[in-house]
Amino acid sequence: MRNSVRSVAAAAIATAVLTGCGGEKDSADKPTATPAKASSEASDRASSAPAATGHDLVGAAGSACPLPVTFTIADKWKAKAIKLDGTALDTLAKQGPFTMACEIDAKPAGNIGFLRAWTSKAKGSSPRAALEAFVTADKDASKATYSEVKAGSLPATEVVYETYSKLLEESKQEHALAVASPSGPVVLQLGGLDTEEHKEMLPAYELAKKTLRSNPR
C-alpha cells in the first residue's frame, strides 16, 4: 500500500515540476520526533552516508541557473531555472519575500525530491532574519530549530523543521539554510517525498553547503 501511495506522490511531484513550480506546502502540526532529536538523527545519517560527489557548478553565468551564489550539485542531479510566466502558478514559486529561482531534481540520481534555491531582493537582511521570514511564510511549517553555521566560507543560518504530508499521512523532515549576498539573501532548501528520501539526499545538500560561494554580479 505504501509503495502505491509513494508512486502516486512521485507522479504528483513530477507533474509539479512540469509546471515550473513545485511548492511543498501540504503540511500541518502533527506529533513526531522533537526538532533536536530529528536534527541529531539527520546529522548521524548524513555523516554515516557516503559523501556526495559532483562536478556541475550551479549559479555561475552560463550555468543552468545563474544565481547570486554558486555551489556544486551532486552527480546526476538535474538543475533547471524557474521562470515566472505571469499565471496563477507563479504563486507556487513564492514564499514570503522569496522567489524560487532554481530547482535541482534528484530523480535522475534515484531519489524523489529537490534542492531548491530561492532568492530575495531584501538587501541588508541577516541570514537568520531571512530564513525565519522564509519558514514562517509557510503557515504549516512547524518545530523549526535554527543554528548558526558556515556555508563554504560564508556565515549562514540553518534550520531543521518538519511538514506533514496529507498524501502519505506522515510527517517529513526539511532542511534549509540562508546566506547573505550583495543582491539579497539566498535560501537553499532540501525537501523530499518523505523523511527517508530526505535523509538519503542529505549528502547532496551537504555538498552544496560545503561548496557554496558568493557570486558577485
Image (tube, rainbow, N blue to C red):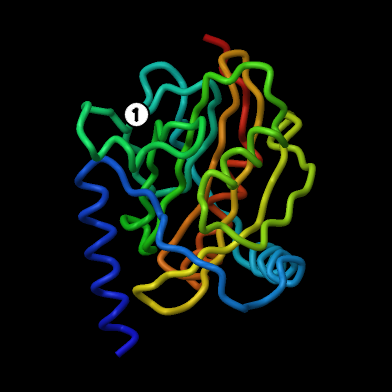
Task: Name the residue at 67% across, 50% down.
Answer: 159
Which quarter of the rendered picture does the N terminus lie within? bottom left
State the residue at coordinates (34%, 43%): 92
Residue 112 is left or right of residue 41, and the answer is: left
Which quadrant of the view contains residue 43? bottom right
Above or below residue 81? Residue 196 is below
Q: Identify which residue, 186 or 134, lies in the foreground.
A: 134
Q: Is residue 27 left or right of residue 34?
A: left
Name the residue beneath numbered marker 1.
64
Residue at x 68%, y 17% (from the top left corner): 124
What amino acid type should be assigned to the residue bearing mark 1? Ala
Residue 197 picture location, percent across and down = 46, 68
- The residue positioned farthest toward the right in the image shown: 148
Most distant residue in the top direction? 217
Q: Position of residue 80 (x, y in %)?
A: 32, 36
Q: Position of residue 65 (x, y in %)?
A: 38, 27
Which residue is found at the position 42% from the left and 79% from the top? Answer: 169
**Location of residue 209 by image quarter:** top right
User: Can you say whether 102 is above or below 68 in the image?
Assistant: below
- Position of residue 154 measured from the top left corner of the image (x, y, whole percent): 72, 29
- Provide the secondary structure element on which disc 1 rests: loop
Examine the rendered structure and indicate whether residue 108 appears above or below residue 61. below
